[in-house]
Amino acid sequence: MAVTMEQVKNILTRDEPNYMEAAQLGAEAIPHLKQLLQEEDTLLASKATYLASMINSDQSADVVKEASQSEHVEVRAAAAAATRNLPQSPNMDVLSSLLDDGDVSVRKVTLKSIRALGDSGADFGEAKPKSAAKKGAKKAAAKKGAGKKGAAKKGAKKEAADEEDTGLLAKIRRLAEDDADPYIREVASETLNQLP
């Protein structure tokens, strides 16, 4: 029996949808979930995003990616939370774009999802960056050991390398060091410290 939009909406309009049970609708529900992203009901679109992430389908990541580009903060936050549920390996492009989001809540949820993915053994394909404290101590030692001219050259090279380093872990490091929100800096630092 084919999955209908009515079935999907009946599940998602509940106050507390049972996502594990709803995921049993399978891949046939994905087109309906994608369609719900286009509607004005941001709560329904958020729930659709999260449900898509619970369904074992190659198309689940497409729904989450589309939601991550929504004009609505609630939907982007749902996409950030949903990334940790995707049956495939984490989508680095989606996580990376969500870390750049202008909304604090989206960045926070993304960092927490990255931490959860790290706890579950996800491979981010990058070497873990050094903590800000260790980097600061090394930088100070380098300045002390080198002349002012040498330290200035090293600093300029480091800044250029940081600008070129657009990997996921580099973005987390930059959030830990430079984000305007102190809570995001704290969560980013904790995320770096907890990643394997």
Image (spheres, rainbow, N blue to C red):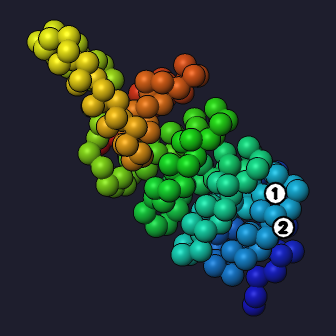
Is 52 drawn above or below residue 164 in the view shown?
A: below
Is 34 drawn above or below residue 64 in the view shown?
A: below
Q: Residue furthest front?
A: 149
Query: Which of the two discs, 1 and 2, labels the residue nearer the N terminus?
Result: 2
Marks 1 and 2, how far apart in space? Answer: 8 Å
Q: Quadrant of the C terminus?
A: top left
Residue 91: x %, y % from top left: 48, 59
Q: Secondary structure at mark 1?
A: helix
Is 180 drawn above or below residue 141 in the view shown?
A: below
The amino acid at mark 2 is Lys
The amino acid at mark 1 is Leu
Q: Can residue 144 be seen at all in this image of the molecule?
A: yes
Q: Residue 44 got which mark?
A: 1
**Camera-nearest residue between 136 and 115:** 136
In the rendered image, which residue does mark 2 sit on?
9
Residue 28: x %, y % from top left: 69, 81
The residue depicted at 77 percent of the width and 62 percent of the height is 37
The residue depicted at 29 percent of the width and 41 percent of the height is 128
The residue depicted at 81 percent of the width and 51 percent of the height is 43
The residue depicted at 49 percent of the width and 66 percent of the height is 87
Q: Can residue 19 be seen at all in this image of the molecule?
A: no
Q: Secondary structure at mark 2?
A: helix
Residue 110 left/right relative to 157: right
Residue 120: x %, y % from top left: 38, 51
